[in-house]
Image (tube, rainbow, N blue to C red):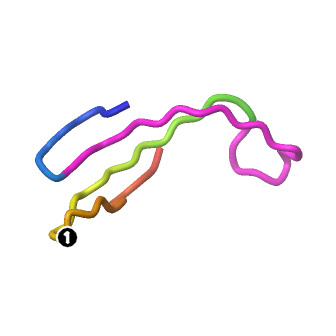
Amino acid sequence: MIIILIKNVEIYKIKYNVKFKDVSKTPIDNGEDEIYYILVKDKNSKWKIASWGR
């Protein structure tokens, strides 16, 4: 899902489900989670991840 569209910048909000075999070894629990990615288009017309996080 694209949240914001600015020239040469795109922000995505990604939702996904995760299920770990051993929850005691992970910083997050099983279930739905979401993360944001900020992509920036550089001078060579390639998209690069500039930032990500919760």
**In this orientation, which residue lies closer to the viewer: 4 or 45?**
45
- Out of 54 and 45, give the one closest to the viewer: 45
Where residue 37 sits in the image (x, y, percent)? 39, 48
**Measured from the top left, where is residue 17 in percent x and y?**
66, 32
| Residue at x-position 24% and y-position 57% | 40
**Residue 1 image-quadrant placement:** top left
Residue drawn at 85 percent across, 48 percent down:
24
Residue 52 colored magenta?
no
* Residue under pointer 1: 44
Q: Going by the picture, which residue comes out furthest to the left?
A: 7
Seen as rendered, the residue at the extreme bottom is 44
Residue 31 image offset from top left, x and y in percent: 70, 30
- Left or right: where 32 falls relative to 43: right
Q: Which residue is drawn at 76% across and 51% down?
A: 26
Q: Does the magenta stretch include residue 24?
A: yes
Classed neighbour count for the residue bearing mark 1: other residues with Cα under 10 Å, few (<14), some (14–19), many (≥20): few
In the image, what residue occupies the spot 70% across and 37% down?
18
Q: Quadrant of residue 4?
A: top left
Q: Name the element at disc 1.
A: loop
In this rendering, the count of numbered labels is 1
Question: Residue lying farthest front?
Answer: 45
**Considering only vertical position in the picture, is 6 above or below 17?**
below
Magenta segment: 9-29
- Residue sticking out furthest to the right: 22
Looking at the image, residue 21 lies above or below residue 13: below
Q: Is 20 placed left or right of 3 in the picture?
A: right
Note whether 42 is above or below 30 in the view shown.
Answer: below
Horizontal side of 37 relative to 43 (left or right) equals right
Kind of residue indicated by mark 1: Asn
Lateral position of residue 6 relative to residue 32, left or right = left
The image shows residue 8 at horizontal and vertical percentages of 16, 53
